[in-house]
Image: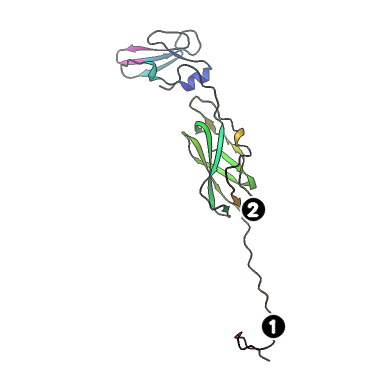
Amino acid sequence: IDLRWLANAIHHSLTWKGTVAAKFGVWQKVSGSTTLVNVDTTGDGQADLVIKINSKEALKSSDFLGLGAVDATKPTVASATYGSNDGTLRSGETVTLSVRFSEVVTVAGGTPSLLLSGGGLATYVSGSGSNTLVFSYPVLAGQNTADLNIASLALNGATITDAWGNGATLTGGTNLNPAGTLVVDTTAPTAPTVALTADTGTSNSDEITGNG
């Protein structure tokens, strides 16, 4: 039973007490074929939360997550990497950017995005439940940059949290440059100019005949 979110919400550690009620305690009571898990969240020794298990159980502390010390450490952005590329992106191409966090995170409630140098935008596509979130960047015309980097990470209404419910600190995602260089060049190549000159004579070898 995962109580990490609850311990974090009340900002207090919880302790397994077996069958005895206690301040900020977790204890069980068996009633017939039902097991009731009681949790005191206010420090008065009374059950404020009851979890019902439809079976008779003999629980122990190892059956719970979140007992003991509360983890209040927020996840942070650790690094970023480019997906597969040849060193230069053209208009219409797509590349992924992976942002690694200091611990496993969960994305919920929205779709985060990365604002990129050159004005591009990468949208979150996968990674919730791991320590690395993957974003996809489709290159549009005019988004030129000598080295693609992450200007900032925006939540857009989403949350990025760890197992304890701590919201991620995103400052590490500001001006974050993945290893290596990835150029974005959306300038269309121009056709070469061919200059023609008048043929004023004949040659036995140029296969061009002058008329006149």
Residue name at image x 35 percent, y 19 percent: 53
* Majority secondary structure in the magenta region: strand
Percent of width and height locating residue 25: 45, 11
Residue name at image x 61 percent, y 89 percent: 204
Q: Nearer the viewer, residue 173 or 179?
A: 179
Q: What residue span does the magenta drawing correspond to? A: 28-35
Percent of width and height locating residue 113: 57, 40
Percent of width and height locating residue 196: 67, 78
Q: Is residue 29 magenta?
A: yes
Residue name at image x 38 percent, y 19 percent: 62
Residue of label 1: 198
Judged from this view, the residue extending furthest toward the bottom is 212
Image quarter in which the N terminus is found = top left
- Indicate which label's residue lies in the foreground, 2 or 1: 1
Judged from this view, the residue extending furthest toward the front is 205
Whether residue 3 is situated above or below residue 158 in the rendered picture: above
Q: Is residue 118 magenta?
A: no
Residue name at image x 50 percent, y 9 percent: 43
Density class for disc 1 (Cα within 10 Å; few <14, some 14-19, many ≥20) is: few
Residue of label 2: 142
What amino acid is found at the position of numbered circle 2 in the picture? Gly
Q: Secondary structure at mark 2?
A: loop
Whether residue 161 is situated above or below residue 208 in the rendered picture: above
Image quarter in which the C terminus is found = bottom right
Whether residue 68 is situated above or below residue 96 in the rendered picture: above
Q: Secondary structure at mark 1?
A: loop
Percent of width and height locating residue 29: 36, 11
Residue 110 visible in the current orientation: no
Colour convention: rainbow
What amino acid is found at the position of numbered circle 1 in the picture? Ala
Q: Quadrant of residue 116?
A: top right
